[in-house]
Each structure stands twice: as structure tokens, then as C-alpha cells.
Image (cartoon, helix red, strand yellow):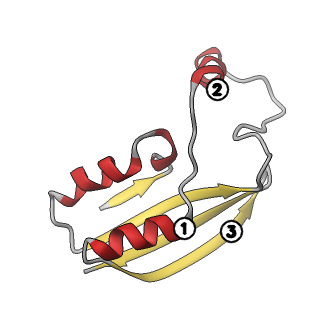
Amino acid sequence: MLLVLVLLHVDWRRGLENMLRFTPSRFYIIEQEQTPGVSSITMKEKLLPSIERYNEVAEMNFVPQHDLIDFLAVKGYRKSWMSSRSVPGDKEMIGFVFER
């Protein structure tokens, strides 16, 4: 099962609980972290109106790595791989693999 950058927009624990009902043997999760105090949208170009509006009203809650790892450990999944890459906007894209 693959999850990409949606955890910061939803109740991530509830979202993962729902995904776990499919009993996947492996999760691939790509998440982002960013420097504290930096806006979640740092693009210099003009945003599309829908994205601009979303940015005004959205509450984005970045998921700390240890919270994600601990939550899935309790559910029987261990982190088997992790890799991180710097991306524009003072952000890090982090890829995880969790397995039963």
C-alpha cells in the first residue's frame, strides 16, 4: 500500500487505521518534514486559485517521524527502510517502508 503526502491533511491515525483494515503486508509512505517556522507553501510563482484558497483555510499538521514509527509498531509493523532527500522550500521528503 502506498501513501503519499496525505497524512498532513487528514487525521493521520484514523486514516492509517482505515488502511490497516486491508491488512497490507507492507506500507510505502512518503511524507515531508520542514524547518520549523517555514510556511508549508513556499512557492514564489502565483498559485492556482483553488490551491491559494486551500492554503488560506487548511490546517496542515506535519507528522513527526517518531509518532508515525511508534504508531505502526503498535499495529505490528516495523520500519524496514527509510531515505530522506532535501527539496526546495526548506523541506525534506522522507520515504519509509514498513513491514509486518
Q: Which residue is mark 2?
A: 55
Which residue is at 15% across, 59% downward?
22
Indicate the position of residue 54 as horizontal and vertical percent values. 58, 23
Task: Give amino acid for label 3.
Answer: Arg
- For label 1, the SS is helix
Which residue is at 15% across, 57% downward?
21
Q: Which residue is mark 1?
A: 65
Q: Nearer the viewer, mark 1 or mark 2?
A: 1
Nearest the camera: 48 or 6? 6
Indicate the position of residue 40 as horizontal and vertical percent values. 70, 41
- Closer to the N terminus: mark 1 or mark 2? 2
Which residue is at 45% across, 65% downward?
68
Q: For mark 2, does the 10 Å Cα neighbourhood hold few (<14), some (14 to 19), or many (20 or more) residues?
A: some
Indicate the position of residue 90 as horizontal and vertical percent values. 80, 54
**The image quarter in which residue 27 lies:** bottom left
Indicate the position of residue 43 as horizontal and vertical percent values. 78, 36
Quarter placement of the C terminus: bottom left
Outermost residue on the bottom side: it is 80
Nearest the camera: 49 or 61? 61
Determine whether, in the image, residue 48 is placed left or right of residue 12: right
Determine whether, in the image, residue 41 is placed left or right of residue 81: right
Residue 39 vertical position relative to residue 19 in the rendered view, above or below: above
- Closer to the N terminus: mark 2 or mark 3? 2
Q: Which residue is mark 3?
A: 85
- Closer to the N terminus: mark 1 or mark 3? 1
Task: Give amino acid for label 2.
Answer: Asn
Distance from Cα at disc 1 to Cα at disc 2: 23 Å
Q: For mark 1, does the 10 Å Cα neighbourhood hold few (<14), some (14 to 19), or many (20 or more) residues?
A: some
Could you say which disc has been placed on residue 47 in the image? none
